[in-house]
Amino acid sequence: MVAHAYTVAFEGVDARMVEVQCAITPGMPAFAVVGLPDKAVSESRDRVRGALSTLHIALPSKRITVNLSPADLPKEGSHFDLPIALALLAELEILPKDAVSDTVALGELSLDGALIPVIGALPAAMAAAEENRALICPAASGAEAAWVGGCQVIGAKGLMDVIQHMTGRTPLSPCDPGEVSHAPDSRDMRDVKGQERAKRALEIAAAGRHHVLMVGTPGSGKSMLAARLPGILPPLTPAEALETSMVHSLSGLIEAGGISRHRPFREPHHTASMAAIVGGGRTAKPGEISLAHNGVLFMDEFPEFPRAVLETLRQPIETGEVMVARANAHIKYPCRFMLVAAANPCKCGYLSDPARACSRAPNCGEDYMGRISGPLMDRFDLRVDVPPVAFRDLDLPSSGASSHELATRVAAARAVQAARFQDHPDMHQNADLEGDLLDQTTALDIPARTLLTDAADRFGLSARGYHRVLRVARSIADLDATDAITRDHIAEALSYRLPQSAP
């Protein structure tokens, strides 16, 4: 007879069911794991043998074969230890075969039989729920997996606890979901002195999830503004929180099983590699753009990033997903993020100050900003200059709207969009508008249409730029709580699209 256990193999954020088959047959003593395992899976036989030895369970002097089906699916990771051990114990008739086959298991075994936490418990629980099976995992991973409704999650500290549970001697209680993080953000937009135009641009960007490029001299407040952007964004919806947490689960970023309702804020260094930004590496792990899913990706010193890295952002910005292609796999990750880029106007940073600019001005500015290609620059909905703040203004009291006030206006605009897109599951914010819905929601009167077409002709807007102006204008109108897009809304949207020239 053959014993069956079940676990999962990860393909991006999707968990594919894997059947673990174990057979003990006459022959030379051996322990073989087949089914396209990687090194970590192949080594599981030694960890399983050591854990069983600690529990004083002897393996028979026969041939033990473990097959991981489907055999053509690559198996990676140490979480195969527990399901292999359960299938083997079921074949040895130590565990009931039906109890083992009715569950999905994952976990790494130490040589003393303890269960070590593994990544991916959340997507594994979702796969188990779809199969109407319970999930057995390490106790430290249970709180994370328990967020999935419709799946009973059993957390165990060691292999002996699992044996006692499955034999009915000491049943384990289902795990409870971890805590929801409510840590307040103490950073406030009022901390930034001046820069009212940049604050307004970030408010519009937050309302419609638009991409922003800030250009200004060193120390003008670009990084301060970007760091305070999450404070004006609405919290993640339950569906968004689960979707985002699945990506973070695969990267081992969920602490103590808790799920955060705060939107991700990722800020990679400009020396980061392409694999770090878009995903990849030996196991095709998610990159920064996927870790920023449903949140903000802040890229400071934007022109300093390698040109190849910048160009790889073009397609994910448009589609909201990235395909990481490797020789043996094509992995798709979600990456619907808001890109906030900051740059100095030139290499030295003081192009606008004749007293401090380098000898190559103004050519250095053209060369420096020329590192950002035209197609990539065209994908920024808002481009805003961030001039230096006068020293005398730094001593003035804080002014302008607080983060709480801005967040209230942004939340109201997002609520309007939620109602707008309730019948369009592929669209979430105004940045996603396209096709007939774009035409319906951005219908312009004659003065507004004339202004837009004249500006498009004068400044040579691309078709993409033309539509992005309409989307930004729609967000501005939503902030004003009006259905109609007026000439003023178009003028403001154009002013951020063409910051150096009046439309």
Image (cartoon, rainbow, N blue to C red):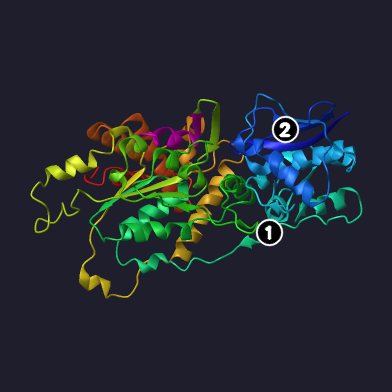
- Which stretch did the figure color magenta? 311-325
Is 496 left, or right, of 500 in this rendering?
right
Query: What's the amino acid at mark 2?
Result: Val
- Within the magenta stretch, is there residue 29? no
Determine the residue positioned at 42% across, 66% down. 188
Find residue 120 and report its horizontal and vertical position in percent. 64, 45
Q: Which of 100 and 62 is in front in this view?
A: 62
In what element is the residue under mark 1?
loop
Asked if residue 323 is among those painted magenta in the image, a careful observer would answer: yes
- Mark 2 lies on a secondary structure that is strand
Q: Which residue is drawn at 41% across and 55% down?
A: 203
Residue 321 spot, x, y in % from top left: 51, 35
Where residue 18 is drawn, which disc sits there? 2
* Between discs 1 and 2, the one toward the N terminus: 2
Q: Distance between the Cα atoms at labels 1 and 2?
A: 27 Å
Given the image, on which type of amino acid does mark 1 rest? Gly
Find residue 65 and name its label: none
Horizontal relation, residue 112 to residue 299: left or right? right
Q: Nearer the viewer, residue 153 or 5?
A: 5
Q: Look at 87% across and 42% down and name the residue there.
A: 99
State which quarter of the image contains the N terminus. top right
Dot 1 alpha-carbon crowd within 10 angstroms: few under 14, some 14 to 19, many 20 or more: some
Q: Which residue is drawn at 26% across and 61% down?
A: 219
Is residue 125 visible in the rendered structure shown here?
no
* Pointer 1 residue: 178
Q: Position of residue 329 (x, y in %)?
A: 55, 28
- Of the 4 image quadrants, the one containing the C terminus is top left
